[in-house]
Structures are given as C-alpha cells and as structure tokens.
Amino acid sequence: MIVFDLSCPDGHRFEGWFSSSEDFASQQDRGLLCCPQCGAAEIGKAPMAPAVPKKGNQSLASSGAVQPVAGGQLSPKAVKALQQIAAMQAEALKSSEYVGPRFVEESRAMHYGERDAKPIHGQASLAEAKELHEEGIPVAPLLFPVAPPDDIN
Ligand SMILES: [Zn+2]
C-alpha cells in the first residue's frame, strides 16, 4: 500500500491509500475519488506531498532539489516579499508627516476638525491605539518600525 496526500480544488487536504500509483491513476480517471470535506471529485495529488521516489529516480532530497526551510530562515521568495512590503510602506509614508509621540493628539485633532487632515504617522501605545479606535478614529499599525527622521525638517 502507498499513501498519497491529496487535495481538492478548494485546497482541502486528505490522505488516500492505494495499492499502487496505477491504482490511484485509475481511480482518479474513473472519478472514484472525492473530497471528504466538500465532495469535490476533481482530486489531485497535493502540491506539497512528500516525494514518493519512483523506480530508478533519485529521491528529491538526495538530488538537492529541495531547499528545506528550517531554523527560522526565510526562503528567498519570502525575503523578496518582505522587501516589497517594506518598499510599499516607505512609498506610502513619503506623503505622510512624522509626528512622533504627538500621534494620538494629532489624530484626535484631525478627527474633530481642529486641524487640517493629512496623512500622519508616529508613535502610540497599544492602549492609545485602542482608545482612538473606540472613538472611531482610523489607525493602522505600521508593518515595519520607522526611525524618527530627526535630521529632516
Ligand atoms: Zn474539498
């Protein structure tokens, strides 16, 4: 018997036991497989299924084709994604004024029309952010810490 990790078009994963790969292919062809969670019949092998070495083939691990993510290391793709997010944040902050610890005060002043509304960013504690939120003032956390631009302005 061999076990395959299977998935449906909705991404539900489950295991299927087969007497051979041919048995799996034949059941798949005849539409005998279906997702236990949603009943979908378009079942395929899950993309991240552990490698089942085929006859005469090297296993993926020993061929070096697989780069495991371990020890908190990020894949190059993840690093790239984070860099892109950081760049997007930097772009968004270009038109935003850094108000530092005055953030809470300035946000309130804008919300209540005491000053002109414009994008600002700065520091607020979690409790302060919660208070603003409860007053209906939209605040969003920055994904990356921003250094105070002391040398600007
Ligand atoms: Zn499903």
Image: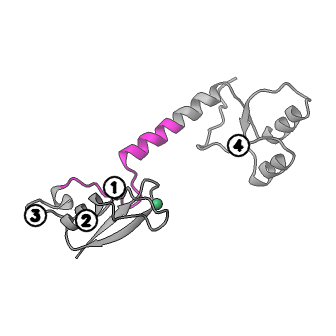
Which residue, given by chain and number where applicable, does mark 2 sit on?
24
Q: What stretch is highlighted in magenta?
A: 64-85
For the point 82% across and 27% down, which residue is it? Answer: 117
113 relative position to 125: left or right: right
Comparing labels 3 and 4, the label whose residue is closer to the camera: 3
> Which corner quadrant of the image does residue 46 belong to?
bottom left
Q: Are marks 2 and 3 in contact (CB under 8 Å)?
A: no
Q: Are marks 2 and 1 in contact (CB under 8 Å)?
A: no
For the point 72% across and 38% down, which residue is it? Answer: 122
For the point 87% across and 38% down, which residue is it? Answer: 108
For the point 88% across and 34% down, which residue is it? Answer: 109
Secondary structure of the residue carrying numbered label 4: loop
Q: How crowded is mark 3: few (under 14 residues within 10 Å), some or many (20 or more)?
A: few
Q: How far apart are marks 4 and 1 (CA)?
A: 35 Å
Which residue, given by chain and number where applicable, does mark 1 sit on?
47
Comparing labels 2 and 3, the label whose residue is closer to the camera: 2
Q: Where's residue 44, x and y in %?
A: 33, 57
